[in-house]
Amino acid sequence: FRHHITSLAVLTARVPVVRLRDPATGVCADLSVQNTLPVVRSQLFKEYSSIDSRVRPLVMLVKAWAQARGINSSPLGTLSSFGYSILVLHFLQHLKILPVLTDATLSLRGSSRQRALAAGRPGFLELPGNSPRSVGEVNVEHHRNVAEVLTGWGDDDKKTTAALFAAFFE
């Protein structure tokens, strides 16, 4: 079976991209070259998703909700898909389900704290003291490869993904 992927060069974007779409599946992707900030953003989302299993499905639900209403296009004056993802992360941080991985010192909570203390480790993480990582002028330093340590950080909150989705709009 063959797919005919459509492409469109978006040269007016802040960073030029080629927008790809598979008409058979509806899957879309943007392709850019020599733009490392989205790679770092993806790494950060991967870290958050590995800390709590509700992150990815909640982000997908909110993005699908926005797309169904046609309000996920920054060129049209609405939030981008990335913007909705950031809103979800902020929402989960506000509820103390996720930590703020860019904080220099990160206190452990829930079962992540219990595991650390039982293993004789401190109840916090600190970013390395060397110079912060940056992409252009954007500081992208954050706690990395911490899923094993931070899993269970927000497990005091037992809400389901569906309950979190409803609460996102309250």
Image (tube, grey):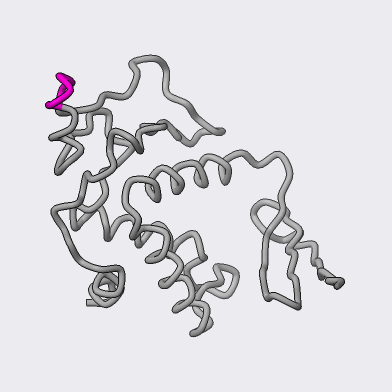
For residue 165, which quarter of the picture?
bottom left
The region drawn magenta spans 117-122
**Residue lying farthest top?**
130
The relative height of residue 130 versus residue 13 in the rendered view (above or below) is above
Q: At 18% across and 28% down in the image, what residue appears?
A: 116
Side of 40 relative to 89 (left or right): right
Magenta stretch, main secondary structure, is loop
Side of 34 relative to 77 (left or right): right
**Residue 121 on the magenta span:** yes
Q: At 22% across and 28% down in the image, what residue appears?
A: 105
The relative height of residue 31 versus residue 104 in the rendered view (above or below) is below
Q: Depth check: 64 or 53 in front?
A: 53
Q: Depth check: 71 or 108 in front?
A: 108
Q: At 15% across and 19% down in the image, what residue appears?
A: 120
**Residue 147 on the magenta span:** no
Residue 64 placed where, x, y %? Answer: 48, 75
Residue 15 placed where, x, y %? Answer: 67, 51
Side of 127 relative to 132 (left or right): left
Residue 65 placed where, x, y %? Answer: 44, 79
For residue 151, which quarter of the picture?
top left
Q: Depth check: 2 or 64 in front?
A: 2
